[in-house]
Image (cartoon, helix red, strand yellow):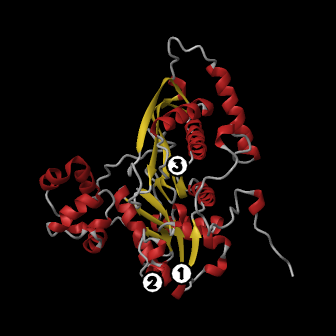
Amino acid sequence: MYALADCNNFFVSCERLFRPDLNGRPVIVLSNNDGCAISRSNEAKALGIRMGAPLFKISDIVKRHDVAVFSGNMELYGDMSRRVQQTLMEFAPAIERYSIDEAFLDLRGIRDTDFDALAKEISRRCLRDTGIPVSVGIAPTKTLAKIASKLCKQYPKLRGGCYMHREQDIEKVLRKFPVTDVWGIGRRFSKHLTERGVTTAFEFASLSKEWVRGLMGTTGLRTWRELHGEACIDFEAGFQAKQSICTSRSFATEIYDFAELAEQVAKFTAMTAEKLRRQESACGQLSVFAWTNRFRQDEQPSKGSSVAVPFETATDSTPEMVKAANRALQEIFVRGCGYKKAGVVASAIIPASEVQTALFDTRDHARQHRLMSAIDSINGSMGRDSIIIASQGFGDIKMRHEHRSPRYTTDWDDLPTVTVK
């Protein structure tokens, strides 16, 4: 058996945890630069606010219905996600973090257990220990477990947990479950299926293997088998190192000055290098890109450009990567253009233990590694960016976050205060 634990309206739930006065009130959380709604409370959904709706298009609804609006507070959300993961680890031999608000639990080998009671207990404990409501679905496959978790959100009487295993129950659910919501189908195949009259998960599961393989290949066939109760998606226990790491942001206003843009790119590069070290990896190539505002017709060039810088020896060194990023930015920067977005991508990633020094590379990599370890240790204990590379500058990333809540659990200055009267 597999379990899927899915935090309900996660970003909104994190905000409500420290603002209980928001319970029952419509709430939305916005993307970078306060652009679009990326998390909505059930009350906000009932008002017709769609996922990804730009704030300026729903401003009338926000004002008319007193919708609480928050800028994304990823430090808070990441910390709360970690706390939920810690609670989940108490219930299974291994967990697989699927996203910031979802995790699979490996329940194979667990026998003589009331799985329905277990699902409800996991949900209850997560709420008790973290304050975050979590829907837990348990089923013979990962795909069915995700469907079971969705049922918990639709039917409160399930009390946060659903065990779906009997064939008749699975068929009953699949007959009503939209094929567009099945994990692994995707937008492109959803369109093809609906055009052919396949609108439910049951209708998809009723197709022949040959038809599914012909249209969707082995990936679609794997999903088809999962709906039939055959576990085909491997459980990836433990930490999985990323094969590429991208750090980018859209800016609140266009940046015309090279030094100002270089400072922002240096920040993104330092964040990328830190992520590499965290997963004990090194990259063989760094790409830098910068785009102008595509909504302005007077900008030339209108789409921006990018350039890749290879490293002779794969690296996770912040100074080395920042220097490379600055050289790359000099190649693509065009004076007179206002850049609205920029970022870096680390690729050709390998484990740090497998890095081979180039033949004519005489640098002391061991010393550089000790330096980076010391900086990471200090930043970890004293707070992010306590020590930085000078080219990063001392300002924040130039983003709009007019509605950001305090970072209650990750910043000493934002610790909640209690007033006793």
Q: Which residue is drawn at 46% across and 35% down?
A: 331
Tell me whether the residue at label 1 lies in contact with that at label 2, contact meaning CB atoms closer than 8 angstroms.
yes
How far apart are the two marked residues, 1 and 3, measured between alpha carbons? 38 Å
The residue under label 2 is 47
Q: What residue type is labelled 2?
A: Leu
Which comes before the other along the chain, label 3 or label 2? 2
Which comes before the other along the chain, label 1 or label 3? 1
The residue under label 3 is 93
Q: How crowded is mark 3: few (under 14 residues within 10 Å), some or many (20 or more)?
A: some
Q: Quadrant of the N terminus?
A: bottom left
The quarter of the picture where residue 45 lies is: bottom left
Q: Which residue is drawn at 64% across and 21% down?
A: 366
- Spot the residue most to the bottom: 64
Q: Where is residue 108 in the image (x, y as percent from the top left)?
A: 43, 51
Q: Where is residue 209 in the image (x, y as percent from the top left)?
A: 15, 54
Q: Nearer the viewer, residue 125 or 348?
A: 348
Image check: 207 left or right of 278?
Answer: left
Q: What element carries label 2?
A: loop
The residue under label 1 is 26
Q: Which amino acid does label 1 sit on?
A: Pro
Q: How crowded is mark 1: few (under 14 residues within 10 Å), some or many (20 or more)?
A: many
Q: Is residue 222 above or below residue 20?
A: above
- Spot the residue most to the top: 360
How far apart are the two marked residues, 1 and 2, measured between alpha carbons? 8 Å
Viewer-side label of 3, 2? 2
Q: How crowded is mark 2: few (under 14 residues within 10 Å), some or many (20 or more)?
A: few
Q: Where is residue 351 in the image (x, y as percent from the top left)?
A: 50, 30
Is residue 244 at all visible to an observer of this figure? yes
